Amino acid sequence: MKVLIVGSGGREHAIAYSVAKSERVDKIYCAPGNAGIGTIAECVAIGAMEFDKIAAFAKEKEIDLVIVGMDDPLVGGLVDVLEAEGIRTFGPRKNAAILEGSKAFSKDLMKKYNIPTAAYENFDSAEEAIEYLHTKAKFPIVLKADGLALGKGVLICNTLEEAEDGVCSIMTDKKFGTAGNRMVIEEFMTGREVSVLSFVDGKTIRIMSSAQDHKRAKDGDQGLNTGGMGNFSPSPFYTEEVDAFCKQYIYQATVDAMAAEGRPFKGVIFFGLMLTPDGPRVLEYNARFGDPEAQVVLPRLKNDIIDVIDACIDGTLDQINLQFDDKATVCVVLASDGYPLKYDKGLPISGLENFEGKDDYFCFHAGTKLAEDGKTFLTNGGRVLGVTANGATLKEARAKAYEATGWVEFANKYMRTDIGKAIDEA
Ligand code: AMP
Ligand code: GLY
């Protein structure tokens, strides 16, 4: 088989790694990919939003399967464009990717189908939102831009003034662009956060594994929100009791709700959950693998990923026995100092060869590119590498991951030193 992966981050590198393990696959392409992906796939200079070029490339190379990793092309309808050209594609269609693409949609869906989530109201105008804040709001309160905003469109406001400013920045100043044409105002919840990844075939859902993200830039969950600075999997806080609750009230209910709405979901659903004192609640849905959640979950997948993807596309996931190694995994993101704001790029990276031939260690590339000499790896983004290790326990995996962060160097290397600290509290 020939497989084309769409995207360019650590998630796509982890997907490429899994696809490369499949005996059914002869050739992998990635659009646009990165330097690390380039070691196992052929990267092509086509952007993830260049739908016509992706379709033309897939036809020219007779691609058997396209895997769309990223949120923007999914929400924008790349799967529909490719399917219309007869190209077999893994990922939700546009009418299902809206589960991530519109927070107002996902909140309304949860309300209609009694899926536990924070109480909320949707707003189309800043005036109505501000009126609501004055009359009905309890503080702290959470403001969310409706659309995609790189994980940054959520504001937690402690006072009325802060919340008024927040509404203005989302809806009037359009700080998050058109994502702020609508917004959600919701109840502030407390509790530990857990992410859960799943494969879905439109009817059946198979849970992969739980993980815990570290979204803030600095140690102790300080600093700005980022795409994710590292994570661990499975989460020790995702107990059997939590799992049973989510199976009864959240997972299948979401899949059934989407089907009932005429929007059958095929692909990966990422459940962002909060374990509140009143039980698990959905914080958000994503319509794809998380980044870096993919890096801590896919290295433990025992099935051939192509078999699982085929089952999702064909609606036969009920026949798949999804299996994972009984190990724990920790990923520490090596970022460019200054991320998520301003940082230098184009700096040489050394030591990547230290990962070669080591079974339990992975160095997934996020923002890297090759220098003109075709050999030197250079930094090319805010998140540069995801240094990942498997261990018998979370503690062992964490020690190994942090050990391996010392194997690679670049001039402005920055990381959190407390990824997985919560493991000690478990
Ligand atoms: P989201 O993109 O919706 O997952 O929100 C980003 C982050 O904001 C989450 O990971 C939480 O830390 C926080 N958050 C979102 N919604 C709420 C809420 N209702 N209550 C408390 N924190 C929230
Ligand atoms: N790590 C969170 C996400 O991929 O959205």
Image (spheres, helix red, strand yellow):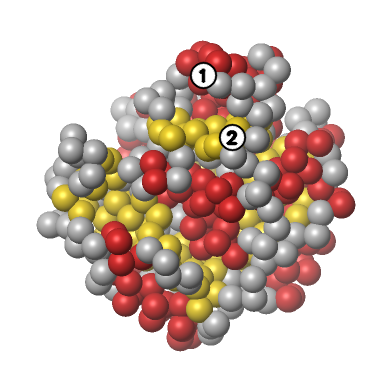
Label 1 CA crowd tier, 10 Å (few <14, some 14–19, many 20+): some
Residue that mark 1 sits on: 57
* Residue 371, numbered circle: none
**Mark 2 falls on what kind of element?**
strand
Q: Position of residue 213 (x, y in %)?
A: 46, 62
Q: Position of residue 150 (x, y in %)?
A: 41, 40
The response on whether ligand 2 sits within 8 Å of label 1 is no
Q: Position of residue 149 (x, y in %)?
A: 42, 37
Query: Residue drawn at (38%, 60%), measured in percent from left and top?
Result: 363
**Which amino acid, by three-letter code, is at mark 2?**
Val
Q: Position of residue 119 (x, y in %)?
A: 63, 50
Residue 57 appears in the figure: yes
Q: How many marks?
A: 2
Whichever of labels 2 and 1 marks the residue nearer the N terminus, that label is 2
Is 149 drawn above or below residue 385 in the view shown?
Answer: above
Query: Residue drawn at (31%, 28%), measured in percent from left and top?
Result: 173
Label 2 CA crowd tier, 10 Å (few <14, some 14–19, many 20+): many
Query: Residue drawn at (37%, 32%), measured in percent from left and top?
Result: 176
Residue that mark 2 sits on: 3
Relative to residue 411, is residue 264 drawn left or right? right
Query: Residue drawn at (46%, 55%), measured in percent from left and top?
Result: 292
Relative to residue 402, is residue 380 drawn left or right? left
* Closer to the camera in the image, 284 or 140: 284
Is 107 drawn above or below residue 179 in the view shown?
Answer: below
Residue 269 appears in the figure: no
* Closer to the camera in the image, 21 or 263: 21
- Place residue 175 in its image quadrant: top left
Relative to residue 52, is residue 339 drawn left or right? left
**Which amino acid, by three-letter code, is at mark 1?**
Phe
